[in-house]
């Protein structure tokens, strides 16, 4: 027999969204239970400790200056951050060429730079006009949502290099190919992240700061405050609404409450059985919000040796397997860590590969960027988020063409006593930890304002 | 305690795909159990009997001359068909205008006709070059899969009227907007259906024939032969593979077998719990194959009165709510039946509406086509397939941009002892009953050829 639990609100999922919702509800005097499928909290945020105690993050890790919810959360929880290493030249590999850049722009030809500049500007301008709370109400929403980002790139960048850099941007934000993305969604997410510069920059942007101890300190600190309210090993299978109460059936638990918050990614929310069944629009929306594909890889070295060569550790490429890297060394630089991202098609190509094949491919690519020493780390770890049964893809879900305009209003609309959270429901930094925190705050306020 | 069942193969889902697979396996001497969630067989095929005994179909209903698997099935099962009523003029409504046409083409201006003609020809030519067993290997697959059908329409049809008719084609085939569809998918499905003419025609095409007694006679006849092998009220929740055996847990049943066939739509296949978890690529594919949106409506009249006025009962419109109608009267014409389709955006607009609002809107549209008598039927019935918990959308699933090229090979690839069927896996008449039957035959052959 399952343990019976009673609460005002049951929260499904102990990622940042669910934990923030639970904290706010508990602070407002509500009895809360959080049911988490895994043996840990954090969802898409997860630390890994290397053999010698160096902590890295297998999932979300950075916060930036525009991320109001995460910055407030860090401050509320008394968590320390430190700046991402951002000194030296970035690398950009095009075919055989390895270019260095001092600012954000590599030393490309003036034609390419002009082309890229006008395309970024055009993208930012279009993005600014997408309403963050209702992208389907943008001027020309049907037309913007009726095409892929790839179509826009081909029509708005003339040079192959500029196109490839725009595609790289898409992969780095969505872990998906620009062919998969609605242009309207790409614009929405760009606006929600404060524009292209804000999204792509280290200093001054989304990759500016890191958490001392790794980003998992955030969900851990929230969970610690919530204490026994958080139940692990409790995947939710079924949510039943009966009049003024909701019953949530998880492995080992049967929880009753007045309201429930579903704070898991849309594709996983679709896998819960709802009784009565959800309305068609809500169900069909969750059939249409797939998660991106990313394998995040870390290599540990004695020292951050690339720094000696004037390199920042940031590299990007027009070809796989490793499209993007950063210096992810500990704050004191006592060890060197490179983090490498395999995103979209690159992640899919190596997704089914044996561990040693993947490792070999990733270290080979790091060596091409940073020299032979990069091929021989002390330790290596990677995680394919598509294989994680309680996530099934990262960074977040994206909207394919036509979905915002056909189904957008169903995204946050509660169904009876069921409320929806998660970074995919956020109006700022959608897909980021900050969006998750925002969604937790929004859903808690929604419930506190609702009739009992 | 659930009833324990033992078989060589468990089939999940008693639609045409699952039933054909089960029949072929049983005929080959295999012990088979079919687990069906509903209280009936047929899946997306379902009869409805009007008050006076007239049978209509709420789901799939037609078969056509190129549909080899359904024609053979009908003949094997000794089922009778009759021709769809196809005499008289079709109607085409554009804004305020109601045009009549004697052939397949309405009396449009010569510019529009030339525009439409070249666009259809171009679409057919492109479609012919998409390999039906591997659309991702088409010449230029990346480019075709990188854009929406809407993008292609805007670039390849010059007149608004031709564009609208192409959009209507998309809705009628996919029950989705052309904005939602990969061009490559639209081409694949067009090729799989024998081309635009074959798909859109009554006589000589996909709407040519109907089953005496309604299309549900097909699954009913298959189920009758399978007898107690088919278990109703048995939604499958979990599939576990242990070495050389598979355990399938359904409400009320625990079935063990050597192999399992999952013959439910991809979005529902994703909602079963698999142990061990499915590979990332397969899981992510099923996050990306949403079902279309359609409400199928029938109005019953004393007589097929439109026939007296020289009308075929077929009407199409550039505007909602009713985009397409057909004469669906019984074989002897003793009563009149009009079937009206609300597809894509039209279905979504009226999806959440109260029953009487929907009925009023549909009958109002029928009256605009066929005169005031159409507004007052003897009886009326409709079904929104998005609300059906064991289907969640019709006609079939579609591939949004980027999905064929990124995930196509995972569509039919068995995972261990789990095999995939359903019309979405078909290489001919994908999305039709014929594709379902083909997939059932294919998967049965796959299992019979597999090592024990």
Image (spheres, coloured by chain):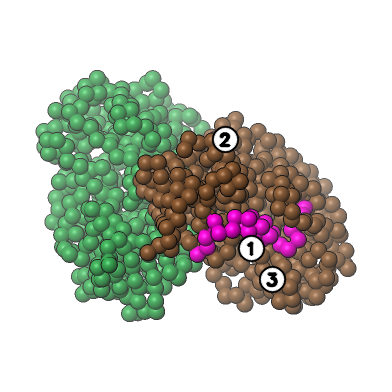
Chain colours: A brown, B green
SS class, disc 1: loop
Q: Which residues are magenta?
A: A207-233
Is A290 drawn above or below residue A452 in the view shown?
Answer: below
How far across and down, in percent of the image, does residue A355 sit?
Answer: 60, 75
Pick the residue in front: A13 or B94. A13
Query: Residue B406, how many percent across, how many down?
Result: 53, 59
Labelled disc at residue A49: 3
Give the chain of mark 3: A
Q: Nearer the viewer, residue A256 or B193?
A: A256
Q: CA distance from mark 1 to mark 3?
A: 10 Å
Residue drawn at (56%, 43%), measured in percent from left and top? A443
Q: Is residue A91 above or below residue B315?
A: below
Nearer to us in this view, A155 or A194: A194
Residue A218 pos. (x, y %): 67, 56
Q: How far apart are the two marked residues, 2 and 3, measured between alpha carbons?
A: 41 Å
Chain letter, disc 1 residue? A
Give the chain letter at badge 2. Answer: A
Q: Give the position of the C terminus of chain B as an image quadrant.
A: bottom left
- Residue underneath mark 1: A46
Q: SS at mark 2?
A: loop
Inter-mark Cα distance, 1 to 2: 31 Å
């Amino acid at each position: 027999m399952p343990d019976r639990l009673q609460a005002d609100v049951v929260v499904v999922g102990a990622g940042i969204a669910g934990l923030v919702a639970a904290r706010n509800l508990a602070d407002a005097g509500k009895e809360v239970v959080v049911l988490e499928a895994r043996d840990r909290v954090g969802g898409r945020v997860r630390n890994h400790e290397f053999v010698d105690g160096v902590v890295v993050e297998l999932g979300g890790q950075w916060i930036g200056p525009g991320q109001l919810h995460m910055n407030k959360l860090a401050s509320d929880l008394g968590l320390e951050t430190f700046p991402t290493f951002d000194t030296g030249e970035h690398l950009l590999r095009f075919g055989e060429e390895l270019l260095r850049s001092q600012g954000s722009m590599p030393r490309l030809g003036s034609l390419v730079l002009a082309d890229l500049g006008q395309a970024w500007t055009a993208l930012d301008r279009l993005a600014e006009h997408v309403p963050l709370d209702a992208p389907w109400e943008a001027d020309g929403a049907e037309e913007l949502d009726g095409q892929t980002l790839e179509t826009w790139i081909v029509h708005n960048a003339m040079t192959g290099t500029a196109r490839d850099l725009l595609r790289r941007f898409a992969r780095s934000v969505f872990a998906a190919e620009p062919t998969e993305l609605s242009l309207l969604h790409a614009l929405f997410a760009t606006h929600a992240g404060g524009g292209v510069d804000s999204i792509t920059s280290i200093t001054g942007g989304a990759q500016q700061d890191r958490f001392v101890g790794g980003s998992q300190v955030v969900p851990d600190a929230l969970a610690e405050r919530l204490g026994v309210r958080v139940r692990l090993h409790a995947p939710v299978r079924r949510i039943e609404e009966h009049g003024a109460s909701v019953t949530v059936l998880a492995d080992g638990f049967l929880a009753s409450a007045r309201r429930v918050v579903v704070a898991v990614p849309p594709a996983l929310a679709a896998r819960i059985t709802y009784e009565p069944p959800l309305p068609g629009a809500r169900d069909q929306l969750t059939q249409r919000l797939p998660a991106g594909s990313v394998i995040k890889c870390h290599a540990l070295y004695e020292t951050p040796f690339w720094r000696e060569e004037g390199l920042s550790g940031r590299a990007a490429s027009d070809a796989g397997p490793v499209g993007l890297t950063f210096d992810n060394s500990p704050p004191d630089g006592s060890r060197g860590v490179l983090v490498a991202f395999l995103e979209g098609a690159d992640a899919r190509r190596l997704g089914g590969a044996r561990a040693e094949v993947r490792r070999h491919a990733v270290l080979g690519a790091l060596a091409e960027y940073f020299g032979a020493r990069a091929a021989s780390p002390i330790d290596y770890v990677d995680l394919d988020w598509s294989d994680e049964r309680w996530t099934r893809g990262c960074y977040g879900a994206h909207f394919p063409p036509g979905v915002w305009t056909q189904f957008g209003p169903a995204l946050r609309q509660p169904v009876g006593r069921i409320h929806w959270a998660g970074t995919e429901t956020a109006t700022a930094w959608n897909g980021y930890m900050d969006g998750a925190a925002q969604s937790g705050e929004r859903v808690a306020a929604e419930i506190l304002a609702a009739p009992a």
